[in-house]
Image (tube, rainbow, N blue to C red):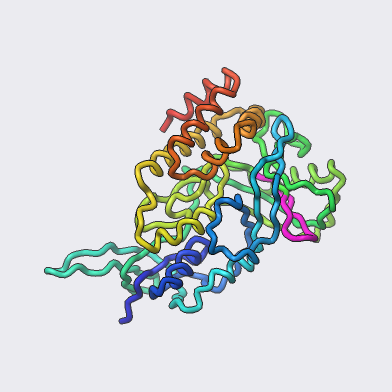
Amino acid sequence: MTTSDLVVCGMGPAGRALAHRALATGLSVTMIDPQPDRRWSATYGAWADELPEWVDARTLAATVDRPVAWAVDRVELDRRYVVFDTGRLQDSLDVTRARVVRGRVVQIVPPSRSGPALDLPSVRLASGQVLPGGRIVDARGIARSPALAEQTAYGVVVERAHDAETLFMDWRLDNGAGADEPRSFLYAIPLDAKTMLFEETCLAGRPALETGVLRKRLVHRLRARGIDLTGDERVERVRFPVHGGRPSAGTFGAAGAFTHPATGYSVATALRLADAMVAGDSLWPPSARAVYRLRLAGLRALLALPPQDLPVFFDAFFALPVDRQRAYLSGRDDLPGTAKAMAALFRALPWRLRRTLATASMGV
C-alpha cells in the first residue's frame, strides 16, 4: 500500500489550502471527503492584511478600503477588506496531484508501538478502508451541538447600486425586530462590479436565530431602504458554530479552533497558517492558547449582553484605535495586544455593562 506523507481529512477551504501548500513543497498528499467534487457556495471575506503573499490576487472579487460599521453611530473602519470569488479561490488551491478518496472518516488512529517499530497513524473510513500516512490532519470543521454558540444568516444577491456602501456590521433597528428581541445586523458586501450580497446575521446565539426569522428581518430592512425583492434572487443561508474545535498539532481550520468567536472568520487564518502547518511548526504556543481563552471569555460576555446593549458594545469597540481592533480581531498569538484591546474596551463601556461582562467572562 502506498503511504502518503500527509493525509488531510476534509476538503473545505482549510483542508484544501493545507493540501495545496503541502503539494507545493513536494510532499505526497491524500485527501478524504464524502463529497470531494462539491463546489463551495459560501461567501468568504477577510481583512487584506491577514492574507499570505501566495494567495492569487485573481481570487479577490472586491476590495474595499474603508468598510462602514453602524452601531450607535456610523464609523469608517481604517482597514482594507476583501471579498473572495469563491469559485476562483477553490480552483486556485490546486490539488490535482493529490490522491483523492471519497469516503467518511470514522476514526483517526494515532501511531502506536509494535515491538521496536512505531506504527504510522491512520484513518479508518466508514467503508472499513484504512489509510495510513506520515501525518494525519483533521480539517473537517466542527459538528453542530446545542452546547456550542452558532452564527446564522440569511442573504440575497441583488444588483449593485453605484453608491452602495460596504457594511461590515449595521446594527440599526430598521429590520422590524423589537427592542427586546435578540439582535441581528446587516452585512452588505460587493461580490463583483455588478452584484451585492445583503445578509441579515445573528452574530452568535445559543440558540441562534433561525434563518426564517432572519429572512423576514432582511426583507423588512431592505424594503425600508427602498430595495424590493422579486423572490428570484440567489439566496445564501449560513449556520455554523463560532467556537469549538481542538487546538492541537493534528487539527486545522475550524476543527483546530481557528474560528474567531467574535466574527466567525477562519478562512484567512487557515490560509495564513498553512505553510507553518506543513513545516511542522507549532501553531499553538502559550501566547496563542492564552489569546484563545481570552476570546472565549469575550464570547461568553457577548452572549450575556442584553439585546439592546449590543450596539453600545460595538460602538465602543469600533471607537478603539485601529491597532487595538486589529490585535483583537487578528492577533491570534498577540497576547499583550489582545489583553490591551479588551481592557480598553472594558473601560470605554458604561458601568452597568462592565458588571455584566465581568461576571460572564469569568464563567465556565
As rendered, which of 165 and 259 lies closer to the eye? 165
Residue shown at 45%/47% (left/top)?
244
Taking the view exactly as shown, the residue that stands out farthest to the left is: 115
Apparent side of residue 4 relative to residue 41 in the rendered image (left or right) = left
Q: Quadrant of the C terminus?
A: top left
Apparent side of residue 257 relative to residue 159 in the rendered image (left or right) = left
As rendered, which of 51 and 195 lies closer to the eye? 51
Apparent side of residue 145 relative to residue 92 in the rendered image (left or right) = left
Question: Residue 281's x, y, as percent?
Answer: 36, 56
As rendered, which of 261 and 349 lies closer to the eye? 349
- The magenta-colored residue range is 189-201
Residue shown at 52%/32% (left/top)?
341
Residue shown at 49%/31% (left/top)?
340
Question: Residue 110's x, y, as percent?
Answer: 28, 62
Question: Residue 70's x, y, as percent?
Answer: 72, 36
Majority SS type along the magenta span = strand
* Above-or-below relation of 107 to 75: below
Residue shown at 38%/43% (left/top)?
289
Q: Quadrant of the N terminus?
A: bottom left
| Residue 78 seen anywhere in this rendered image of the structure | yes
| Residue 207 seen anywhere in this rendered image of the structure | no
* Above-or-below relation of 296 to 281: above
Give residue 62's quadrant in the image: bottom right
